Image: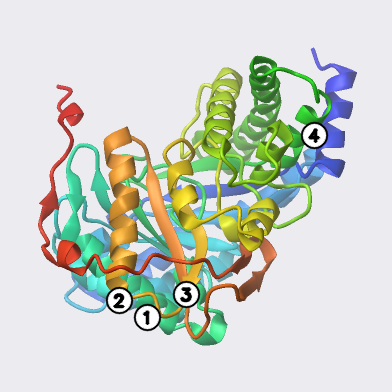
């Protein structure tokens, strides 16, 4: 039975506490589009995406109107293009341009899957796709890219780490006239998941159905507002409040996902219950941590409070929906979180502290602006460090850093919108070059042997 109080509470969350559905993402398999003729393959890709996602944006608008729930982004993820392009002995940039054209045709915000999975080495087409990433991202506005360079089961491909340090720099350099935005559309993963609805790292895994609907929810403002009502609660009570609030947020996500699935005639996949912040006032994960009791995000105690938050979010969400997946937890993207931006500017938050925080939260070093003269091997080592956290802890970690070409520590890079703005943060530039250039495979940890 629907309770009137629950309805009013949800309305309040939407109007005053920044509750929204961050994204409805349609995953589309392109395996049946493979062809040795790149023009034929690209034509198949365009036809498949536009046919499957033809009514995605329209359906999202109908659900917004039906339930009064804001749906911020409509997105598409596709099979990693390195797999689709492997049969073609040409540059895969044509696929990126095709993805862009299809995304604009159906009216979605972003399309992900210009991706490669190289955690154990490079197969046919992988290096060709990775080398093309800077050009592909510079030539498109909606296309996002990701590369998985490690996993708990396989270890870390150090050759891929070395390559991706260079690629991240080139992506920034090729889009310097767009605030180095190319690097903001590129994520390097360890333990990438196949059903992630969030960009820039979403791709449609080969184990997924032909087409599926995944939903990403948000609600940092709702959690903070709930905690503000109990200023004297002990830490156990704080955890319970977060769990109960996450339950309500996730139920909204499931409602939208199931409704979209029915309207589109596509299977419902998962709800990713990640707390995804925005630069908007009142929509910050950092402010939740400060509500729990920190003077500023980054202070001693930040990792502990974030661990509490992440755990409680997962427990509450799992009780609300049996189909939880994606990344699910608390995101800490610096440029997309008003509280993180303030903490980075006032000096309480540094990259080293952010790295420690990634051991207990969803994903990793996300949307961090670094000096434009940061060497490629330092970026490679940042990637390797973050991948090691993911590999050893059997969790997804990622790196999305943006070298601000021509800018120095303390300056501000501003994209506006959901991507926000970020202060250029200090990076330790003592050279890791010898380590990175050794190449080879960092072995998987002993606990990966679970069979």
| Distance from Cα at disc 2 to Cα at disc 4 | 45 Å
The residue indicated by pointer 3 is 371
Rendered-image quadrant of the C terminus: top left
The residue indicated by pointer 4 is 225
Above or below residue 268? Residue 190 is below
| Distance from Cα at disc 4 to Cα at disc 1 | 43 Å
Secondary structure beneath disc 1? helix
User: Mark 4 and 3 residues: CB-CB less than 8 Å, in contact?
Assistant: no
Determine whether, in the image, residue 227 is placed left or right of residue 340: right
The residue indicated by pointer 1 is 135
Secondary structure beneath disc 3? strand
Q: For residue 318, what is the image quadrant? A: top right
Disc nearer the start of the sequence (4/1): 1
Which circle, 2 or 4, is nearer the viewer? 4
User: Mark 1 and 2 residues: CB-CB less than 8 Å, in contact?
Assistant: yes
- How many discs appear? 4
Residue shown at 77% from the left, 42% from the top: 69
> Residue 298: x and y, percent?
58, 47
Determine whether, in the image, residue 40 is placed left or right of residue 9: left
Which circle, 3 or 1, is nearer the viewer? 3
The residue indicated by pointer 2 is 132
Disc nearer the start of the sequence (2/4): 2
| Distance from Cα at disc 2 to Cα at disc 3 | 24 Å
Which circle, 4 or 3, is nearer the viewer? 3
Disc nearer the start of the sequence (4/3): 4
């Amino acid at each position: 039975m629907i309770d009137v109080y629950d309805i009013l509470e949800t309305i309040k969350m939407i109007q005053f506490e920044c509750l929204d559905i961050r994204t409805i993402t349609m995953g589309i398999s392109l395996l049946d589009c493979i062809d040795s003729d790149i023009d034929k393959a690209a034509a198949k890709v365009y036809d498949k995406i536009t046919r499957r996602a033809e009514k995605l944006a329209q359906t999202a608008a109908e659900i917004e109107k039906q339930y009064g729930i804001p749906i911020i982004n409509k997105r598409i993820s596709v099979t990693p293009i390195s797999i689709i392009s492997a049969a073609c002995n040409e540059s895969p940039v044509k696929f990126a341009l095709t993805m862009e054209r299809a995304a604009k045709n159906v009216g979605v915000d972003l399309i992900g899957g210009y991706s490669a999975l190289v955690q154990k080495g490079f197969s046919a087409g992988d290096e060709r796709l990775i080398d093309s990433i800077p050009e592909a991202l510079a030539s498109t506005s909606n296309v996002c890219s990701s590369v998985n360079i490690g996993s708990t089961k396989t270890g870390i491909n150090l050759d891929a780490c070395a390559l991706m340090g260079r690629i991240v720099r080139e992506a920034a350099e090729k889009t310097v006239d767009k605030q180095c935005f190319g690097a903001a559309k590129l994520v390097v993963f360890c333990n990438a998941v196949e059903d992630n609805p969030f960009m820039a790292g979403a791709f449609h895994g080969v184990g997924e159905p032909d087409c599926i609907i995944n939903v990403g929810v948000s609600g940092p403002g709702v959690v903070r507002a709930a905690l503000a009502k109990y200023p004297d609660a002990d830490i156990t009570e704080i955890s319970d409040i977060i769990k109960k609030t996450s339950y309500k947020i996730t139920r909204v996500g499931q409602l939208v996902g199931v409704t979209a699935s029915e309207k589109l005639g596509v299977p419902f996949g998962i709800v990713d219950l990640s707390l995804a912040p925005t630069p908007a006032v009142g929509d910050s994960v950092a402010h939740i941590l400060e509500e729990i009791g920190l003077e500023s995000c980054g202070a001693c105690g930040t990792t502990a409070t974030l661990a509490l938050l992440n755990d409680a979010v997962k427990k509450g969400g799992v009780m609300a929906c049996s189909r939880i997946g994606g990344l699910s937890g608390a995101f800490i993207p610096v440029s997309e979180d008003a509280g993180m931006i303030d903490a980075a500017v006032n000096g309480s938050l540094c990259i080293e502290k952010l790295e420690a925080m990634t051991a207990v939260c969803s994903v990793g070093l996300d949307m961090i602006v670094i000096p434009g003269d940061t060497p490629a091997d330092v970026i490679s080592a940042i990637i390797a460090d973050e991948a090691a956290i993911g590999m050893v802890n059997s969790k997804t970690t990622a790196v999305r850093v943006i070298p601000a070409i021509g800018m120095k520590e303390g300056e501000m890079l501003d994209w506006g919108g959901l991507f926000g703005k970020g202060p250029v943060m200090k990076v330790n530039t003592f050279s890791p070059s010898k380590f990175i250039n050794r190449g080879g495979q960092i072995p998987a940890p002993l606990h990966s042997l679970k069979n």
